[in-house]
């Protein structure tokens, strides 16, 4: 009814006469077509126009005191709907969010060299980083994000590392895509996932990034942008997305022990629920499967194995359901020690009568002990002379491995061993001569 010349036109809506074109979509010859979509669309459009007029007008947006029935009816409809719709235009609509839960959720994303096939960045079915980013967006759609203690916050990090041969010791590499403190809106998370870059070449300049899974878990436990900034008394969850057996360094490399199994247990000991998604793990690689399973408490509920990154969309619902419905059991309080009952006072025994002392017998005389003979001192046996290389002329050469895997600590141990051997030898120009050579390449 905002069309110019219409006898029922409401002057307040004339600036928005273009909106009347919507009427042609839902009305035909003055008859209303039954369509929920059309009605909702019309109300939203006209309500927006009405709200804009209210903001720019000095008049209050109340019903006209005078006017025909159609004008009053239009004003009632607009005033009843506009406030809610306009508010929704400027704020995130949580009414359709399925999960409303207090949760600090961190995604740890593998960014090693095998994640993107044939270097085809940005192509579906090839780019694992892009597929993982879309997966995170889909999970977040159903979560109620916010800053209060009733909402979910999202943190995202990528992990990889330089080859062991390139840097000694290994050079771990991690990047914060969005901190927990910043992942409080769907818009912020989507912006971060859109900006995620594969660690191989390009922006990060890693020629062949490795899969340092254990180091990555250790990183989210220590980096201030991740779990150290988690809220107190709020459930914490870690989702690991990885595509292969780790290259993490353990104690047998004379390094700190970053085995994925131990690092994941360290996370679980901090009351962090760990969920793992393994992609492209060969069924025949039992060691890789065993390592993947060691990341979680319950592989039946917390482990998802996929054949390719494109299948991530299949587990969105499962991950979201697990995040929404799972509550980690709190650490049980110790069982209180029961207060002991007071010990009853014993009934006093009657005082016994004194026992008569017997007449003492005479003390017997001691039996004389014979004087012992002195113990003879044994004659000591002669000390045998050493027989090591006594009269044999020997030329002895030690050939010592000095390759990269030995390390300075083991070189020092070998030197100590040589000294101990030489101590026992009659080293001289006319007896035993010793030479030492190191080799590598």
Image (spheres, helix red, strand yellow):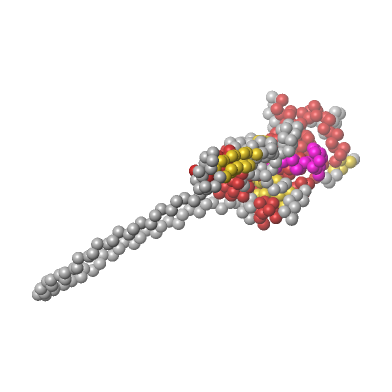
Region in magenta: 105-129
Residue at 65%, 49% (x, y): give it.
Answer: 275
User: Does the image show residue 138?
Assistant: no
In the rendered image, residue 372, in percent from the top left (x then y), is placed at 22, 65
Report which quarter residue 418 is drawn in: top right
Locate residue 143 relative to residue 15 in the image: left or right: left
Q: Is residue 441 magenta?
A: no
Locate residue 224 relative to residue 108 in the image: left or right: left
Which sits in the foreground, 326 or 370?
A: 370
Which sits in the foreground, 288 or 133?
A: 288
In the rendered image, residue 152, in percent from the top left (x then y), is placed at 63, 42
* Quarter of the image that includes the N terminus: top right
Which sits in the foreground, 276 or 288?
A: 288
In the rendered image, residue 374, in percent from the top left (x then y), is placed at 24, 62
Locate residue 165 relative to residue 223 in the image: left or right: right
In the rendered image, residue 74, in percent from the top left (x then y), is placed at 76, 36
Locate residue 358 relative to residue 64 in the image: left or right: left
Report which quarter residue 20 is drawn in: top right
Above or below 438: residue 261: below
* Quarter of the image that includes the C terminus: top right
Residue at 66%, 39% (x, y): give it.
Answer: 440
């Amino acid at each position: 009814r905002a069309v110019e010349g219409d006898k029922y036109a409401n002057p307040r809506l004339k600036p928005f006469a273009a909106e009347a074109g919507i009427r042609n979509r839902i009305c035909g010859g003055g008859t209303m077509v039954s369509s929920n979509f059309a009605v909702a669309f019309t109300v939203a459009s006209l309500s927006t126009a009405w709200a804009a007029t209210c903001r720019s007008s000095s008049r209050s947006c109340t019903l006209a005191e005078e006017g025909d029935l159609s004008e009053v009816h239009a004003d009632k409809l607009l005033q009843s709907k506009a406030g809610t719709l306009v508010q929704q235009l400027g704020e995130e609509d949580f009414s359709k969010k399925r999960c409303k839960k207090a949760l600090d959720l961190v995604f740890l994303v593998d960014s090693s060299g095998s994640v993107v096939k044939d270097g085809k960045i940005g192509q579906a079915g090839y780019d694992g980083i892009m597929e993982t980013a879309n997966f995170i967006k889909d999970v977040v759609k159903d979560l109620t994000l916010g800053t209060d203690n009733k909402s979910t916050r999202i943190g995202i990090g990528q992990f990889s590392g330089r080859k062991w041969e390139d840097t000694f010791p290994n050079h771990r590499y991690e990047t914060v895509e969005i901190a927990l403190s910043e992942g409080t809106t769907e818009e912020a998370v989507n912006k971060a996932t859109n900006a995620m870059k594969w660690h191989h070449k390009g922006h990060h300049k890693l020629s062949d990034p490795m899969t340092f899974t254990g180091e990555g878990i250790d990183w989210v436990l220590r980096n201030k942008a991740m779990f150290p900034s988690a809220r107190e008394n709020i459930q914490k969850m870690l989702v690991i997305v990885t595509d292969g057996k780790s290259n993490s360094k353990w104690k047998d490399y004379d390094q700190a022990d970053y085995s994925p199994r131990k690092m994941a247990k360290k996370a679980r000991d901090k009351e962090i629920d760990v969920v793992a998604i393994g992609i492209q793990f060969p069924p025949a690689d039992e060691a890789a499967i065993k390592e993947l399973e060691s990341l979680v408490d319950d592989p039946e509920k917390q482990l998802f194995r996929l054949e390719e990154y494109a299948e991530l969309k299949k587990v969105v619902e499962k991950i979201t359901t697990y995040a929404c419905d799972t509550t980690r059991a709190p650490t049980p309080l110790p069982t209180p020690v029961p207060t002991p009952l007071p010990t009853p006072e014993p009934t006093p025994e009657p005082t016994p009568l004194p026992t008569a002392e017997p007449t003492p017998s005479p003390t017997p005389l001691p039996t004389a002990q014979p004087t012992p003979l002195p113990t003879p001192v044994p004659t000591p046996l002669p000390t045998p002379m050493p027989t090591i290389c006594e009269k044999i002329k020997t030329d002895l050469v030690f050939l010592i491995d000095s390759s990269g895997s030995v390390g300075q600590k083991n070189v020092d141990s070998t030197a100590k061993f040589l000294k101990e051997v030489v101590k026992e030898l009659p080293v001289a120009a006319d007896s035993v001569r010793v030479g030492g050579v190191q080799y590598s390449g």
